[in-house]
């Protein structure tokens, strides 16, 4: 049973890494057309396909291996310069990557593998791919059942593999023979000798232990790293030595001398030219650290027989020619998302418990206990910040997805559109990132369909032939702001207003600001499209965008300029878990304002009946929380105004008392209270009471509406006189 569990874990790792490799492959395919020297991107695409094929072979995923092998063969011809990665091949490779992704998804769901040669979509793609292989030699035929292959390709070289599997390889869910079978797909196994020397007598034989060794003569055209990759999943449970063919030495020397400038440490040069694998270099470095006096790395590699002395000399010569550069190494650990969520929940409970302990300490008036609790609170705050930082991810990963969307949709629409991205390093909570993808997808597709002008119209307006859709992200007042813009024709204000009147959403003759008119497109079923397409026209999408963003405690606004373009601004909280809050009291009720939005606190001094006050010569609209939430009792004699700032605008919240700053654990409201206006969540205080978290963007809207109503009322009174 343990073997099954380990194998499932390894398979899950393969699925995750395969998807990451497909993302890397897609990103490289989309940027290759814009690069003056695309060789590195082409190599990255090939490596991704090669690694997926190799890993799939270890699990017997024949469908993935069969299809990816053809993709890899085409990419190999691209690397050799025999095939150009042009506008016709890039879409084919993107579609092939999508198909590989669907095969991997089927593996995850446990579905039987469909043969790409007979399955309609796979067969169609293979037929198109084969057209790029018409001049290629026949592939090497393998007969894994006998451990040997018959046909060989021109230019193959003889390698010798000395392989000793560790005793625990079977217990870890690995089949040694599967690695040898997969090795046969990369070339010809000319001979193989099984060494049973380590097999004990029957009385000491462990049926779950592996004691066999193999000496293999191998004819292939692939490089040393590719051979080592065959044993990637078992590399730590075996002793592997790969002896390169002697005829390769001169080729290695030539490769070293012809390398472009880059990382030039001797070991790195040897790895880059294919003479030494990264694992062999690691072993040599450990030997270097243990030797006294320290030996040169080249001498160690030559002594271990890992590389010919001539190759070391050539690498040393190359090392003198270029300046040493070393990119900083990044270290990361893959953590299950559920474990991370569990940690955040525990930190939230810790904050609530610490607040309760602090409250009790103050009641006892024990100075030592109060001091200890103060230290504890500081530590809890540091733990909170560190835990939340674990969930913060860069939005660049989400933005990168839209390069493919823009590429495909532009072809479908017959428009020339490019994507401009900025602010990719802006960080926000991973939960927000996961949920904002679909709304952004709607906005980007709408910008391309409705926003970007037709080519002939752009030419008439004097615009560049290539339209631009832009994605930008930045932090502002404790929120993250994401902007989706286009340089198209802008929104037709009058057309939107007429449609709103037609549908009864707007009273005829009512004066409306541009922002109010543009907000109509978020109404359910609202559409001004004259015809229905695959992308738009059915009146669905934008209302879903607004609803999903509102569910994340965010808001969305539109700005448009006729003939110049449109920008949709989405404002979201940085995190959905824990925030710094400012507590205020209204009667016996406690409310929390996100601390990042609090600008200042002033004494309340507005005239009776007015919903605004004078703040150092500026009009400050405000909302009376007691009236808004119908809190019983009478207002205190000394009320305060909490001045909050959102989206560059200020307004006030009239409260009875100021309780100060406190860490706030956000608890979602139940469905029963989901429609309560002005409240975005709740939190548990140290006393055990519940405090409500204010929805500042919605309260700003309330303040603006109240002020607009008052202004219209004043105008009507003046007109009546």
Image: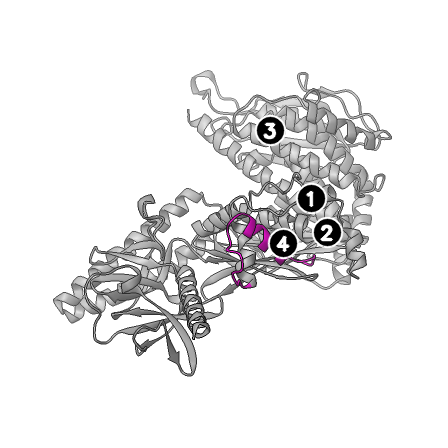
Compared across the picture, whether 13 is left or right of 465 comes to: left
| Tag of residue 417 | 2
The answer for how far apart the CA atoms under marks 1 and 3 are is 37 Å
Q: Does residue 125 show up?
A: yes
Quarter of the N terminus within the rendering: top left
Considering the numbered disc 4 on the image, is that residue within a helix, a strand or a loop? helix
Please say if the residues under marks 1 and 4 sit with CB atoms less than 8 Å apart: no
Considering the numbered disc 3 on the image, is that residue within a helix, a strand or a loop? helix
Q: Which residues are magenta?
A: 486-513
Residue position marked by numbered label 1 in the rendering: 409
Compared across the picture, whether 433 is left or right of 247 comes to: left
Q: Is residue 488 magenta?
A: yes
Residue position marked by numbered label 3 in the rendering: 58
| Furthest-right residue in this view | 135
Please say if the residues under marks 2 and 1 sit with CB atoms less than 8 Å apart: yes
Identify the mark nearer the N-term, 3 or 4: 3
| Furthest-left residue in this view | 364
Where's residue 230, x and y in %? 64, 33
């Amino acid at each position: 049973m343990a073997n099954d569990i380990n194998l499932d874990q390894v398979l899950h790792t393969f699925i995750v890494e395969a998807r990451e490799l497909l993302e890397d492959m897609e990103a490289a395919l989309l940027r290759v057309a814009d690069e003056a020297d695309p060789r590195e991107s082409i190599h990255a695409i090939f490596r991704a396909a090669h690694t997926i094929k190799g890993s799939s072979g270890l699990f017997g995923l024949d469908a993935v291996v069969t299809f990816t092998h053809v993709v890899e063969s085409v990419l190999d011809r691209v690397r050799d310069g025999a095939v150009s990665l042009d506008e016709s091949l890039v879409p084919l490779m993107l579609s092939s990557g999508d198909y590989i992704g669907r095969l991997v998804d089927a593996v995850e769901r446990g579905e039987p593998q469909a043969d790409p040669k007979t399955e309609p979509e796979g067969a169609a793609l293979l037929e198109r791919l084969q057209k790029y292989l018409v001049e290629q030699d026949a592939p090497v035929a393998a007969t894994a059942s006998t451990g040997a292959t018959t046909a060989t390709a021109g230019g193959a070289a003889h390698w010798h593999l000395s392989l000793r599997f560790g005793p625990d390889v079977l217990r870890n869910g690995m089949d040694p023979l599967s690695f040898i079978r997969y090795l046969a797909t990369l070339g010809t196994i000319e001979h193989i000798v099984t060494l049973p020397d380590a097999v004990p007598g029957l009385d000491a034989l462990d049926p779950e232990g592996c004691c066999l060794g193999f000496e293999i003569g191998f004819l292939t055209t692939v490089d040393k790293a590719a051979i080592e990759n065959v044993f990637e999943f078992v590399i730590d449970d075996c002793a592997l030595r790969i002896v390169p063919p002697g005829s390769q030495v001169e080729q290695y020397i030539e490769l070293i001398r012809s390398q472009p400038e880059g990382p030039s440490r001797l070991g790195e040069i040897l790895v880059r030219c294919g003479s030494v694998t990264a694992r062999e270099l690691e072993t040599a470095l450990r030997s270097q650290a243990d030797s006294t006096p320290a030996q040169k790395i080249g001498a160690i590699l030559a002594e271990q027989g890992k590389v010919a002395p001539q190759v070391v000399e050539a690498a040393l010569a190359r090392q003198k020619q270029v300046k040493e550069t070393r990119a900083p190494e990044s270290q990361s650990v893959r953590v299950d998302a559920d474990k991370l969520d569990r940690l955040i929940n525990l930190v939230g409970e810790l904050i609530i418990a610490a607040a309760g302990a602090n409250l009790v300490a103050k009641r006892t008036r024990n100075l030592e206990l109060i001091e200890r609790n103060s230290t504890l609170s500081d530590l809890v705050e540091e733990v909170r910040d560190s835990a939340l930082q674990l969930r913060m991810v860069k939005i660049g990963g989400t933005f990168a997805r839209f390069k493919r969307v823009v590429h495909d949709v532009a072809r479908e629409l017959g428009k020339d559109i490019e994507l401009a991205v900025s602010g990719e390093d802006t960080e926000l909570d991973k939960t927000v990132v996961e949920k904002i993808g679909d709304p952004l997808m709607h906005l980007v597709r709408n910008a391309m369909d409705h926003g970007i002008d037709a080519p002939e119209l752009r030419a008439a307006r004097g615009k560049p032939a290539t339209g631009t859709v832009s994605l930008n992200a930045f932090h502002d007042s404790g929120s993250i702001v994401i902007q989706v813009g286009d340089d198209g024709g802008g929104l037709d204000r009058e057309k939107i207003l007429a449609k709103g009147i037609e549908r009864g959403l707007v009273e005829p003759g009512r004066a409306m600001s541009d922002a109010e008119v543009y907000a109509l497109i978020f109404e359910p079923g609202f559409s001004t499209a004259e015809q229905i397409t695959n992308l738009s026209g059915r009146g669905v999408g934008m209302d879903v965008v607004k609803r999903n963003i509102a569910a994340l405690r965010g808001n969305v606004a539109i700005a448009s300029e006729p003939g110049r373009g449109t920008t949709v601004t989405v404002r979201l909280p940085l995190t959905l878990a824990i925030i710094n809050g400012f507590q205020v009291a209204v009667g016996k009720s406690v409310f929390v304002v996100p601390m990042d939005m609090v600008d200042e606190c002033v004494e309340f001094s507005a005239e009776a009946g007015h919903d605004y006050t004078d703040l150092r010569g500026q009009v400050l609209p405000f909302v009376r929380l007691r009236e808004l939430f119908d809190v019983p009792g009478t207002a205190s004699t000394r009320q305060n105004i909490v001045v909050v700032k959102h989206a560059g605008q200020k307004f006030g919240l009239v409260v009875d008392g100021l309780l100060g700053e406190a860490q706030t654990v956000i608890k979602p409201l139940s469905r029963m209270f989901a429609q309560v206006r002005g409240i975005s969540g709740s939190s548990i205080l140290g006393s055990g009471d519940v405090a409500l978290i204010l929805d500042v963007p919605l309260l700003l809207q309330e303040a603006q509406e109240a002020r607009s109503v008052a202004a219209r009322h004043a105008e009507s009174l003046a007109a009546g006189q």
